[in-house]
């Protein structure tokens, strides 16, 4: 925690459905925000035989809108 922000790093496997990679979606209450492909960074470092998305989140715990139950 830094100031009013809690930070989280989440790693999840990439899902492939009908040869398409399912991109991550951020949910906030009743709304959802798909992550556009242009906001995803790809590295060609040696990886295992699978792909993962690693997401970094910052949540302002002093903001009443961000503390609603989902």
Image: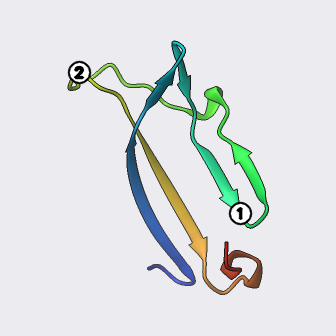
- Asked whether the beta carbons under mark 2 and mark 1 sit within 8 Å of each other, the answer is no
What's the distance in space between the residues labelled 2 and 1, CA to CA? 32 Å
Q: What element carries label 1?
A: strand
Nearest to N terminus: mark 2 or mark 1: 1
Q: Residue at x 73, y 47 (%)?
A: 33
Above-or-below relation of 33 to 63: above
Q: Classify residue 28 by image quadrant.
A: bottom right
Q: Classify residue 13 by image quadrant.
A: top left
Image location (x, y in percent) of residue 67: 67, 81
Q: Which residue is drawn at 67% across and 57% down?
A: 27
Q: Nearer the viewer, residue 19 or 61?
A: 19
Residue at image mark 2: 49
Quadrant of the image for the C terminus?
Answer: bottom right
Residue furthest front as drawn:
18
Residue 28, numbered circle: 1
Local crowd size for mark 2, using a 10 Å CA cut-off: few (<14), some (14–19), many (≥20): few
Q: Nearer the viewer, residue 22 or 6?
A: 22
Q: Residue at x 55, y 66 (%)?
A: 58
Residue 51 as seen in the image, left or right of residue 53? left
Local crowd size for mark 1, using a 10 Å CA cut-off: few (<14), some (14–19), many (≥20): some
Residue furthest top as drawn:
19
Q: Is mark 2 on a helix, strand or loop?
A: loop
Image location (x, y in percent) of residue 15: 46, 30
């Amino acid at each position: 925690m830094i100031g009013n922000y809690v930070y989280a790093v989440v790693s999840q496997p990439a899902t492939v459905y009908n040869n398409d990679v399912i991109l991550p979606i951020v949910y906030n209450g009743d709304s959802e925000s798909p992550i556009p492909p242009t906001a995803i960074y790809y590295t060609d470092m040696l990886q295992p035989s699978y792909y993962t998305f690693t997401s970094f989140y910052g949540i302002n715990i002093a903001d009443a809108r961000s503390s609603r139950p989902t």
